Image: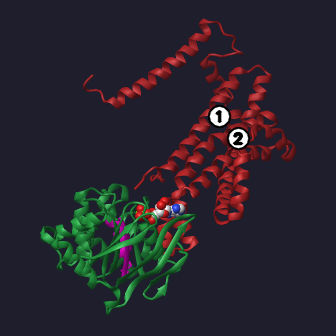
Amino acid sequence: MSGVSPRLVAYAQVVSFFGAFLLFWEYGVRYFEVKSYILPPISAIAVAIWESRDQIFEHSMYTLAEVLIGFIAAVVVGIIIGMIVYVSPFAQRTIYPLVTALQTTPKSALAPLMIVWFGYGFVSKVAMAFLFAFFPIVVATLGGFAGTAKNLEEHFRALNAGPWTTFTTLRLPSALPAFIDGCRVAMPLAMIGAIIGELVGSDRGLGNLIMLGTASSRTDLVFGCIIVITLISLVLYAAIECAAKSVWWRGIQV
Amino acid sequence: MSATATIEANKGGAQPAAQPLANHIEAKGLNKHFGKVAALEDINFGIRNQEFVSVLGPSGCGKSTLLRIIAGLIPYESGSATVRGEVIHSPRPDIGVVFQTNNMLPWLTVRKNVELGARIRKMPAQARDHAVDKVLEVLSLSKFADAHPHQLSGGMRQRASIGQALVLDPPILLMDEPFGALDALTRDKLNVELLRIWQEHRKTVMLITHSIAEAVFLSDRVLVMADRPGKIIEEVVIDLPRPRDAAATRALPQFGEYVAYLGKIMGVTK
Ligand SMILES: Nc1ncnc2c1ncn2[C@@H]1O[C@H](COP(=O)(O)OP(=O)(O)O)[C@@H](O)[C@H]1O
Ligand SMILES: [Mg+2]
């Protein structure tokens, strides 16, 4: 074993774990004779994904667009509200508690309402993605602004720094790690929001495809959609992680 | 005790009224409450131009509160506090402040951190670069200019904090236990550096500390505070020859006598 790097060992462990899992799935369902509309073998799912690739791709792009637009809207509105609360004591007293209270509302319960308000199409799903992503972002941003070190604030006051300078030089960078953490939580939630919206009522998107698959007992296609949704979420999450790397001062106390 | 006698004699010569030079910092009958807690009561003192004065006192006696008032960071209720004859109501550009917790922004390099005050106070770029270079050099931080604060030792960070105040070359320097979080060895070294800087650049300094040796080593005069309520109970002129020197000054018999006397006032030694 002496020549093998620990990294290679760890890699081999991961690969063999997932390999064993997939093999168990593949042959387990055959061995126990699980009905394929309950749990199809993984190979059947792979085949379904391949055969419906054009359809899945088209619906994926539709869902991805909903998620991204909802998420970006949540980021923009989250930052704007964070800034308003920062500059206005009135907003601090009113909007802040309101946002904190609304945070606990189960957002999935709002899906039917979004469809009533914005229709069956694209906009209601963007609204759902937004609703799911908005609260973690705004709460994290507000926390980030509020959490600016008191000694640094005093330091800036001692230098007679104006509010804008203090904001851009101190508050914003010190809120960034918390803001990125909020985005990290919000990104998968935006996907969940969009999918719930599509499940409740839609004519396109991966959630819609899942509904179609279920109605026609195409469990292989349903699983295919779930896997694709997961993969897209992972890629989006990785993108946030990449952005998070540029905010390297998270958790550094000096 | 002859030491005490000498010191008592010095005290007599330290009356502000006998000084021809005007006070740079002056407090008269200053009071400050936090709610019902009397943080400062009837504070009277003056610090002359280019004088180095330390404020010694137990934790919680109101030292930081006093410094914040002089720095224009918090209001006071009654009495008066003035800097160069002007009533203090907000932070002034001619005062540099060094706090106990260093004020490094973790996302900026040492250079950018030291530069911060000059940027905020809108010093022209060329003068600013020049001033930063000089300060980094004086504090032996030039090699670490591009490092980030978390890559520095505690002593270096505290030096950089002093650099943040020095970059504007303020005639008045207020320091709130700047070396309080450091180990004794680093503290002694930074005392020597601070002394050297002060001997070269002569500023009016108000240094808050709870180290008796630090106060004696650096100061022209030491104000001793007591708590509940915070007030000045004693003023001791440190009549040790200048320029002082790391080894020689600390080896002087009078140095030990001052330390012992202040320890007695503060109840550290019997
Ligand atoms: N912002 C504040 N609000 C209420 N009480 C305070 C505040 N700042 C200081 N105090 C109180 O005033 C007293 C003096 O505090 P401080 O000036 O920090 O003392 P020191 O610096 O000598 O340790 C303490 O009892 C402290 O609890
Ligand atoms: Mg203090």
In percent of width and height, residue B78 lies at 54, 78
Give above or below for B240 relative to A234.
Answer: below
In percent of width and height, residue A199 lies at 77, 33
On what subunit does the disc labeled 1 rest? Answer: A
Q: Which chain is green?
A: B
Q: Which residue occupies 59% across, 53% down? A: A143
Which tint is chain A? red
Front position in the image: A237 or B165: B165
Tell me where the magenta segment starts and ends, as one range: B159-177
Please identify the quadrant where the N terminus of chain A is shown.
top left
Front position in the image: A1 or B164: B164
Give above or below for A118 relative to A153.
Answer: above
Residue of label 1: A229
Residue of label 2: A63
Left/right of residue B211 with respect to residue A108 in the rendered view: left
Q: Secondary structure at mark 1?
A: helix
Give above or below for A237 relative to A146.
Answer: above
Q: CA distance from mark 2 to mark 1?
A: 9 Å
